[in-house]
Amino acid sequence: MRVFADYHTHTRFSHGKGTVMDNVRAAARKGLEAVAITDHGPANLFGVGVESLATFGEIAEEIERSREAFPGVRVLMGVEANIVDTDGGLDVPAEVQKRLDIVLAGHHLIVRGRTLADWWKLSGRNFAARWSRHLAERARVDNTKSLVEAIRRNRVDVVTHPGLHVSIDTAELARECARVGTALEINAKHAHLDVAFLKVAARQGVSFCINSDAHGPDEVGEFGRALEVAMRAGIEPERIINVRA
């Protein structure tokens, strides 16, 4: 398999180390046809996300400059949005989503929920679930519901690192992704996905996307483990949106 695009990279605008230009330069050096700049939405705590929605204007300016500098690489303006309530609401509203080339969304634990109750369901209960089977079962239901509702209610192209730090119903999420045309990410940075997960998801007819989740320019286009797991699971190249055989 050959991955021709990296649709999940971060810059200094969230908690990455490099600039937009640095990531695009790295993509060009790796021979990628496309790279997406997908910094975290503003609901992330402790400086992980963008400062505010207005930051996307600054990112757009840097993207324009990088497009001029590297015309051989298609540079996409994107986001890794956060789920902020169990009804699937995101911290990037629809009017901003419409201005983006690609929208990624994921369930992150260190985020501000829309309400205190949302924070408990999305974050607090997942931490407490380590010590309570009942809470773990309840968390799994709400984790899955929040992801399913997010792709139903929003324009989400890719669900990032599904199941990272949270328990989900893989089959249910994959079925809904297949229905609405959203891809599940095979993340090269995090080692939580295994062959069994991918086989369960693949049986639902879902598409996949292999991404680096780069937090520094040197990580852009590094897909090693994700490619290995995809091949071991028998995922056909035509099922992966950024891969050619």
Image (cartoon, helix red, strand yellow):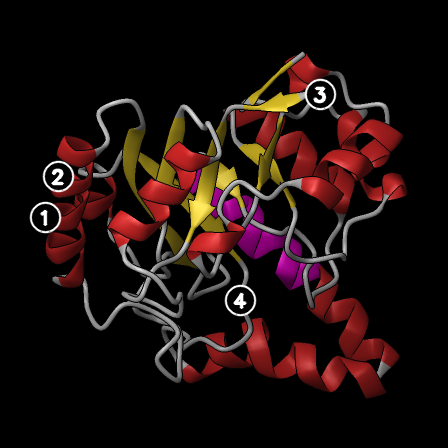
Left-right relation of 75 to 157 = left
In the foreground, 117 or 230: 230
Left-right relation of 96 to 211 = left
**SS at mark 2 in the image:** helix
Q: Mark 3 points at which residue?
A: 205
Q: Which amino acid does label 4 sit on?
A: His
User: Where is residue 21 shown, x and y percent of the image?
Assistant: 25, 48
Residue 151 is inside the magenta segment: yes
Residue at the image position 84 percent from the left and 35 percent from the top: 200
Residue at the image position 46 percent from the left and 45 percent from the top: 8
Tell us which disc is closer to us: 2 or 3.
2
Mark 1 near mark 2, Cβ–Cβ under 8 Å?
A: yes
Left-right relation of 59 to 244 = left
Q: Earlier in the sequence, mark 4 or mark 2?
A: 2
Q: What whole-number distance in Å separates the C-alpha atoms at marks 4 and 2?
A: 29 Å
Q: What whole-number distance in Å separates the C-alpha atoms at marks 1 and 2?
A: 5 Å
Magenta stretch: give its range. Answer: 141-154
Q: Quadrant of the N terminus?
A: top right
Residue at the image position 25 percent from the left and 42 percent from the top: 97
Mark 3 near mark 1, Cβ–Cβ under 8 Å?
A: no
